[in-house]
Structure formats: structure tokens, C-alpha cells
Image (cartoon, rainbow, N blue to C red):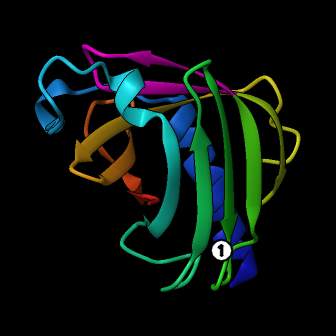
Amino acid sequence: MKITARSMLANFLLLASLVAINPTTASFAQTPGKPLKEALIGHWQLVSVTANERTPYGTDPHGSMFIDGAGHFSIIVISSGGARSVAYYGTYTVNDADKLMTLHLEDSVGGGTSNAAGRDLKRLVVLNGDEMTIQNERQDGSPGTIKLTWKKAT
């Protein structure tokens, strides 16, 4: 099972790097006129991770994502399932029109992200109140199978 979870995470990173945005799949509920970058700033707590309708990080994964206004982020995901825990950090850019966040990895550890420094991961972002869903898309524009749900920490 660990091999499958590692393979799923590696596939997640590969798919994320091949993202192609399909604007028809993105709904973006936020305060009108508020830029995406501004809406992302803060501390987010992990709610769930699904991959191919499975939960490789278990039914109760724990994690934190910190995003600052200067363009820096850090993510830690602690597994309660078969996948290895993972942590990575770096800088990010935002494309408001496409609701896209690109994570520029400076360093990482665990899962399939080891030695991923220099890699860019593109994420389609959907905000709904204090909840954020980040999902990759396949190169052909169809929705990806990896989805992380985060809730704004209070």
C-alpha cells in the first residue's frame, strides 16, 4: 500500500506540473473586486486530500498552509493513511483571470516531492467563504483527480 500511496503522490506532482486550466470548471466565490492573491493570504488548515476518489493521507489528515502577501508559502501535510507525510515551501504567483496559483518550490521533503526544488506546481483555486479547494487539471483540460480542501484558520 505504501508503494501505491507514493506512486499516487508522485503522479499528483506530475499532473500538477502539467496543469491546463479550463475556466468553465472554476467557480470563485469571494468578495467582488478582491484579488485572488489577497484572498489567499493567511493560515489554512487541511480538511481532506483525495486522489482518484481515494484518501491516501487517511480520513483525518492534518496539515497547515501559510500564505503571505509577499509571495511566500509553506505547506505541511501529516498523513494518517498510507502516504508519507510531506512538506514544501517556496514562492507563489497568482493569475486572477484563470483562478490559478503557481507554487515555485524552493525545497521539499517526503512523499514524491523530495528533490523537487525548482519545480513549479500549478493549482486551480476555488474559494467558497472560508473554504478553499485546490485541484490540478489534466493536460487535456479535464478535471484532475487530486483535490485538497483547506479551511481558513481562525
Please state, as top left, top right, bottom left or bottom right, where the N terminus lies in the image.
bottom right
Asked if residue 20 shows in the view, the reply is: no
What is the span of residues highlighted in magenta in the rendered image? 91-104
Q: Secondary structure at mark 1?
A: helix
Above or below, 131 relative to 41: below
**Residue 92 shown in magenta:** yes
Left or right? Give the position of 107 relative to 123.
right
- Dot 1 surroundings within 10 Å: few (below 14), some, or many (20 or more)? few
The residue at 74%/59% (across/down) is 86
Asked if residue 99 shows in the view, the reply is: yes
**Relative image position of residue 133 (x, y in whole percent):** 34, 51
Left or right? Give the position of 66 relative to 32.
right
**Relative image position of residue 41 (x, y in whole percent):** 48, 34
Above or below, 66 relative to 1: above
Instruction: Label the magenta part by its dominant secondary structure.
Output: strand
**Residue 10 shown in magenta:** no
Q: What residue sits right under mark 1 in the picture?
A: 4
The residue at 56%/51% (across/down) is 12
Figure quadrant of residue 97: top left
Above or below, 12 relative to 61: above
